[in-house]
Image (cartoon, rainbow, N blue to C red):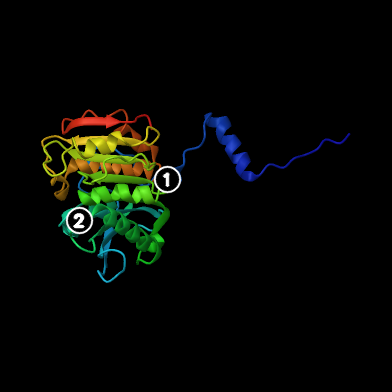
């Protein structure tokens, strides 16, 4: 009887060799952009990527225009995208500091204006998604953004808008509400990994009535963390803030890029004196 020979695909041969030599799956280097992170690197005012900007007119439909910050490096493939909305009565300038700070860590970041400064959270959620679609489909840098790896952030009613956006589009990879405000206090529909920042001395969106209930009503199966800024007011996200930046970078890297190197900054729950309360669903 003649022995039967079966050809194995080259990819399977390489995978088998890797398992034989290392006893584990090979690292997914494609998801890792930039050098190995340290506390110093995520706290830095700028990351390893040089960035540039592109202005978007307020005449575009669905939101109020804004500024795109993007890495100039074209050797890394497409980057994840992050859209950020301001709060009630505020403009893009109130959250503009996050643009270059996050983009220099390896993201295409879109800080937007809303159609009017009094738009409510549901409207801001729709505008975040409209801006995300513009970023990936019609912007000058659409070819630099991976449409399958998108996140949204927002302050105050913009933060409430991030929850609305995730409720409407569960395919988002991450959301980060910053001292969020919303009349709806329960979010059992959210499956998107969620990092909520509260502010201990928030007199506009009290953590007792907003940020904490938002966190507590997220499903147990949703990766989630709640970080409360010690001694901070509702408007802490409107100024450059290292605590907000470092954990936002770690969250976006972990869930938008699926970069496991950043889990160390999130799990176990950080023991950070800048935080008055920490809650998390670790391990993710």
Q: What residue is pinned by disc 1?
A: 31
Q: Is residue 260 left or right of residue 186?
A: right
> Which element type, helix, strand or loop, lies under badge 2?
loop
Is the N terminus in the top left, top right, bottom left or bottom right quadrant? Answer: top right
Image coordinates of residue 26 in percent, x first then y, are 50, 37
Is the C terminus in the top left, top right, bottom left or bottom right quadrant? Answer: top left
- Residue at the image point whose x is 35% and y is 61% from the top: 135
- Mark 2 touches mark 1? (CB < 8 Å): no
Circle 1: is it few (<14), some (14-19), or many (20+) Cα within 10 Å? Answer: some
- Residue at the image point whose x is 27% and y is 51% from the top: 161
| Label annotation for residue 96 | 2
Q: Which one is earlier in the sequence, the residue at label 2 or at label 1? A: 1
Q: Is residue 250 visible?
A: yes
Q: Is residue 13 left or right of residue 65?
A: right
Circle 2: is it few (<14), some (14-19), or many (20+) Cα within 10 Å? Answer: many
Instruction: Choose between 195 and 38: the one closer to the eye.
Output: 195
Instruction: Choose between 160 and 54: the one closer to the eye.
Output: 160
> Which element type, helix, strand or loop, lies under badge 1?
helix
Image coordinates of residue 59 in percent, x first then y, are 27, 71
């Amino acid at each position: 009887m003649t022995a039967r020979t079966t050809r194995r695909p080259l990819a399977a041969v390489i995978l088998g060799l890797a398992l034989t030599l290392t006893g584990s799956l090979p690292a997914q280097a494609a998801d890792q952009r930039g050098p190995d992170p340290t506390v110093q690197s995520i706290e830095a005012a700028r990351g390893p990527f040089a960035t540039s900007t592109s202005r978007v007119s307020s005449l575009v439909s669905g939101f109020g225009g804004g500024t795109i910050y993007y890495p100039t490096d074209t050797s890394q493939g497409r980057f994840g995208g992050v859209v950020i909305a301001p709060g009630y009565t505020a403009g893009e300038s109130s959250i503009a500091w996050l643009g270059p700070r996050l983009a220099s860590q390896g993201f295409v970041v879109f800080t937007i204006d809303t159609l009017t400064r009094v738009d409510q959270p549901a409207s801001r959620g729709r505008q975040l998604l409209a801006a995300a679609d513009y970023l990936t489909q019609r912007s000058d840098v659409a070819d630099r953004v991976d449409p399958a790896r998108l996140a949204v952030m927002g302050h105050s009613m913009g933060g409430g808008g991030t929850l609305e956006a995730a409720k409407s589009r569960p395919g988002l990879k991450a959301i980060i509400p910053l001292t969020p405000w919303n009349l709806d206090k329960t979010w059992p529909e959210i499956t998107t990994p969620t990092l909520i920042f509260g502010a201990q001395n928030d007199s506009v969106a009290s953590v007792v009535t907003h940020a904490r209930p938002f966190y507590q009503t997220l499903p147990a199966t949703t990766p989630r963390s709640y970080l409360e800024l010690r001694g901070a007011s509702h408007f802490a996200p409107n100024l450059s803030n290292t605590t907000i930046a470092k954990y936002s970078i770690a969250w976006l890297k972990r869930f938008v890029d699926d970069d496991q190197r950043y889990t160390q900054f999130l799990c176990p729950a950080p023991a950070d004196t800048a935080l008055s309360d920490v809650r998390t669903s670790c391990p993710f």
